[in-house]
Amino acid sequence: MLQLDIASTIADLVLAEGRSLGFRPLTVAVLDANGQVQVLKRDDGSNGMLRPEIAQAKAWGAVALGHGGRLLAKRAEMAPAFFSALDTLSHGRVVPVPGGVLIRDADGRVIGGVGVSGDLPDNDEKCAVAAISAAGFTPDAG
């Protein structure tokens, strides 16, 4: 189970990583294994009305489908009709791009997901992976 203090730590680590690498200001969502938001934080200057929704959708898609955003992006290219249907079924809650990363415990179980938005998708993913690792968990970006 992903505890609130750990989810908050991961979110803080994401934002700190983005700042240390000179990335644009980020928005991060940390979800539990049921896809519920535990923490949502926006860095100062993380502009854009949809940043929170994008971050949540990156994490939600990873948790819902059991794969990180990088793999979901590849699958979306190979099966666009499926992902179009999935978009309808999920009410637009899946964004299959890098930046959605699963949080796995020591036994490999999914205990949550992190979604990051604000910079390039690869940079968003880099921050999520670094934060999850720094918190002592295994990131799964797909």
Image (cartoon, rainbow, N blue to C red):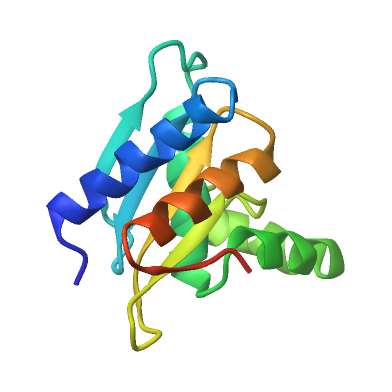
Q: Is residue 80 visible?
A: yes
User: Residue at point 25% right, 46% down?
Assistant: 9
Q: Quarter holding the N terminus?
A: bottom left
User: Residue at point 59% right, 23% down?
Assistant: 22
**Residue found farthest to the right:** 78
Q: Going by the image, does 113 lie left or right of 12?
A: right
* Residue 3 horizontal/vertical position (percent): 15, 60
Q: Going by the image, does 101 lie left or right of 142?
A: left
Q: How many marks?
A: 0
* Residue 77 horizontal/vertical position (percent): 84, 61
Of 131 and 29, the residue lying toward us? 131
Q: Tell me where residue 75 sits by quadrant.
A: bottom right
User: Residue at point 43% right, 44% down?
Assistant: 56
Q: Quarter holding the C terminus?
A: bottom right
Q: Is residue 81 visible?
A: no
User: Residue at point 42% right, 40% down?
Assistant: 14
Q: Going by the image, does 70 lie left or right of 28?
A: right
Q: Going by the image, does 33 lie left or right of 18?
A: left
**Residue found farthest to the bottom:** 107
* Residue 138 horizontal/vertical position (percent): 43, 71
Position of residue 4 relative to residue 64, above or below, is: above
Of 133 and 109, the residue lying toward us? 133
* Residue 101 horizontal/vertical position (percent): 51, 59
